[in-house]
Amino acid sequence: MFDNLGAFEVGALLLLALLIFGDRLPAVISDGLRMVRNLRNMARNATTDLSRELGTDIQLEDLHPKAFIRKHLLSEEDEQAIRKPLQGIYDDLRTDVTGVHKDLKDVAAAADLRSGAAPAATPPRPRSYDLDAT
């Protein structure tokens, strides 16, 4: 969740929290943790009630509509039947993209000027028109 925060940022946030809340910081932290526990319990109770009403085992992750349909409404055969027409298109597209990627790599390798090869064509020098020479 906080993978992109470094030690300096975490320290700055803690210092800011200490400056804002002061002596009340432990109480604010405990209230925040209590709120998170209550939210977790409410989500657990909701999934238990929904599971009991539907007569199937539902986890919190299953409440996403796609996951719910995939797990509880479609059988594996139905899912394969839905995927089968699209699988051929996907395979053809993947082959084409792989071919284009390979061609681009070949062109980039051929046009790489750092490899020591001389450039194919040098740009022409601009002409100098001397008006005094006439």
Image: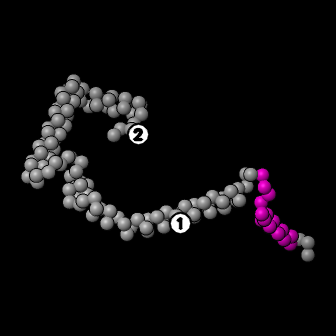
Q: Amino acid at mark 2?
A: Asn
Q: Provide the secondary structure element on which disc 2 rests.
A: loop
Which image quadrant is residue 34 in?
top left
| Image quadrant occupied by the C terminus | bottom right
Q: How many marks?
A: 2
* 122 inside magenta stretch: yes
Q: Which segment is the magenta one?
A: 116-131
Q: Nearer the viewer, residue 1 or 69?
A: 69
* Residue 36 seen in the current view: yes
28 versus 104 height, above or below: above
Q: Among all residues in the image, which is located at the extreme right?
A: 133
Residue 35, image quadrant: top left
Query: In the displayed structure, does residue 60 sit left or right of residue 108?
Result: left
Whole-percent x, y for residue 116 in the image: 78, 52
Bin the neighbour count of mark 2 within 10 Å (Cα to Cα): few under 14, some 14-19, many 20 and up: few
Image height of 32 relative to 75, above or below: above
Left or right for 62, reference 122: left
- Looking at the magenta stretch, what is its main secondary structure? loop
Q: Residue at x 54, y 61 (%)?
A: 98
How packed mark 1 is, by other alpha carbons closer than 10 Å (few <14, some 14-19, many 20 or more), is few
> Mark 1 — residue?
96
Estimate the spatial distance between the alpha carbons at disc 2 and disc 1, rounded to whole Å: 36 Å
| Viewer-nearest residue: 18 or 80 | 80
Residue 3 place in picture, x, y as percent: 39, 38
The answer to the question of whether label 2 and label 1 lie on touching residues, with beta carbons closer than 8 A, is: no
Label 1, secondary structure: give it: helix
What is the number of the mark on residue 70? none
Residue 4, numbered circle: 2
Of all residues, the one furthest to the bottom in this rendering is 134
**Place of residue 99 in the rendered image (x, y in percent of width and height, measured from the top left):** 57, 63
Q: Nearer the viewer, residue 113 or 75?
A: 75
Q: Residue at x 80, y 67 (%)?
A: 124
